[in-house]
Amino acid sequence: MARLPPTSDSGRLLPVVPKDPLTNALDAIVVSTDLIEDELRPHLETVLTVIQEKQRGAAEHVAVSGVLPTLAQALRRRGPLTLITAKLVSELARETVIRERCGETGVSSALLSVLLSRDQELLIHAGRAIARICYESRCQQEQLLRLGAVPRLVGILLGFKSNQALEGVCLVALCNLGDMGEGGEDGGISWERGVSLCPEESVFRGVTCHSCGFGSMVTVVRLTQWSPGQHTVSIEVLSRYSIGFWTMHNNRRTVRRSPLSHLGTCPRFYKAIKYSVQNIPNSRSLKSLIFHIFL
């Protein structure tokens, strides 16, 4: 039986309002079961473009559309759609309304499965998505830690030492997982390798400048091997102020300072994480993915 067009109470035909491109794309992705590249890629690109343009209400529309489980499935399949899906999830993870749904929809665990890939571009997008998802979110941090995010991120750091962009993404993700993120969800940190005290130690030093120009935040991440396949991650954040700041401060009021105050640094936080990066399991079982992690 043919479906009749909508009518008003008076019997007049109502105009058919066409769906906007975002709605059409989301509807097509949600109903897809086979994840065929030729069919879905244009729709994924449409959603990505809309999110990048920051159209009003777009993130909320995506959040309630039911599309996130499909994106998680595309990430796990490791097919031709995985890269663009990871890029889309990375952009979506900027939005709080999306971040808070990543755990329950399987997106977070799917991103961790992507971290086993050898595709460095894919790893950058997945790592950036994880960094954004767990930024200032204790719930997401705890879930990702339970699922084994730390050993996989550090495994990438140890395996791709020549890729500075990937290195920076993983360091920001580690800091955000430890609730030590500075400079926003993407870090805004300029990273460099520091001097290590022993061959078993890798040191990374990141600097975030304050907008006022009088100081900066220094983040130090240390990876120390304490037995075969076993490492400790320590993260320390310090505030550093310029001589101009102290001069201005002293001109306003006289205070009693310690003999070391001229150094202009004071530790703000310190956290250590112990974990194993040996024999990372491919199983999705929660029990097999738990590592020895202490925050």
Image: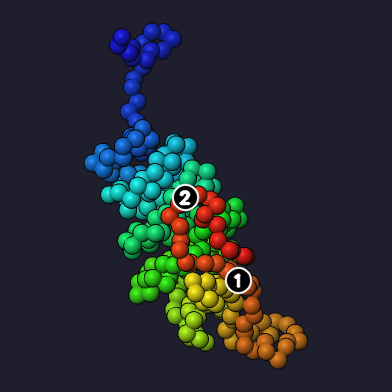
Give the answer, above or below, for where 244 lies relative to 158.
below
Occupied quadrant, residue 11: top left
- Residue 28 appears at what percent x and percent y? 33, 34
Quarter of the picture containing the C terminus is bottom right
Residue at point 51%, 63% (across, down): 150
The local crowd at label 1, few if under 14, some if 14 to 19, many if 20 or more residues have their Cα within 10 Å, is some
Residue at point 58%, 63% (across, down): 292
Left or right of 135 in this view: 26: left
- Residue 109 appears at what percent x and percent y? 47, 50
Which labelled disc corresponds to residue 102? none
Residue at point 45%, 44% (across, down): 59
Dot 2 falls on a residue whose secondary structure is loop
- Residue 245 appears at what percent x and percent y? 61, 82
- Between label 2 and label 1, give the one nearer the viewer: 2
In the rendered structure, which amino acid carries the disc numbered 1? Ala
Answer yes or no: is residue 2 visible.
yes
Q: Which residue is mark 1?
A: 272
Q: Which residue is mark 2?
A: 284
As rendered, which of 181 and 145 lies closer to the eye? 145
Give the answer, above or below, for where 201 lies relative to 41.
below
Residue at point 32%, 61% (across, down): 119
Quarter of the picture containing the N terminus is top left
Left or right of 144 in this view: 190: left
In the rendered structure, which amino acid carries the disc numbered 2? Arg
